[in-house]
Amino acid sequence: MQRIMLKSKLHRVHVTHSELDYEGSCAIDEALLDAANIFENEQIHLYNVSNGERFSTYAIRAERNSGVISVNGAAAHKANPADILIIASYAHYAEEELKAFHPTLIYVDAQNRIQSQRNAIPVQAA
């Protein structure tokens, strides 16, 4: 059996640009892509914390260490500059692979600079 699991996440990045007249996709600082193991043209899911929108597109590279998160094309209707997003990628894993599986979780500051990396979401007390 194959399971679809969270491969990686960029947690609470801030949208820096929203470009309607662009071919499409989401431009992401190359340092963030590398840290999250997201490839250019890979499908990504975006969850807009600011307005509740959820959508998918593909990743493209923005300049390394620029902090750029640019939501482009039709998706620009779903995110504005300063909105907070969670960007997630998923992958198919065989049952055997899950024994050593851990997602890559990247946490950033308000300028989209990496602050920490984890491999699990901390358990929250009720």
Image (tube, rainbow, N blue to C red):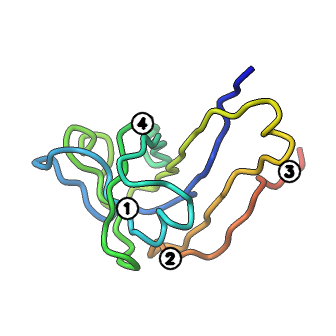
Please tell me which residue is depicted at 21% across the width and 38% down the height of the picture.
Answer: 74
Inter-mark Cα distance, 3 to 1: 28 Å
- At label 2, the amino acid type is Arg
Inter-mark Cα distance, 3 to 4: 25 Å
Inter-mark Cα distance, 2 to 1: 12 Å
Sequence-first tag of 4 and 2 = 4
**Residue ID for mark 4:** 53
- Tell whether label 2 touches label 3 (CB within 8 Å): no
Please tell me which residue is depicted at 48% across the width and 67% down the height of the picture.
Answer: 32
Residue 57 image offset from top left, x and y in percent: 35, 39
**Residue ID for mark 3:** 123
Inter-mark Cα distance, 3 to 2: 24 Å
- At label 4, the amino acid type is Glu
Sequence-first tag of 4 and 1 = 1
**Residue ID for mark 2:** 113
Q: Nearer the viewer, mark 3 or mark 2?
A: 2
Q: Is residue 116 left or right of residue 87?
A: right
Instruction: Tell me the quadrant of the picture where the N terminus can be found.
Output: top right
Please tell me which residue is depicted at 37% across the width and 61% down the height of the picture.
Answer: 28
Instruction: Tell me the quadrant of the picture where the C terminus can be found.
Output: top right
Inter-mark Cα distance, 4 to 2: 24 Å
Q: Nearer the viewer, mark 3 or mark 1?
A: 1
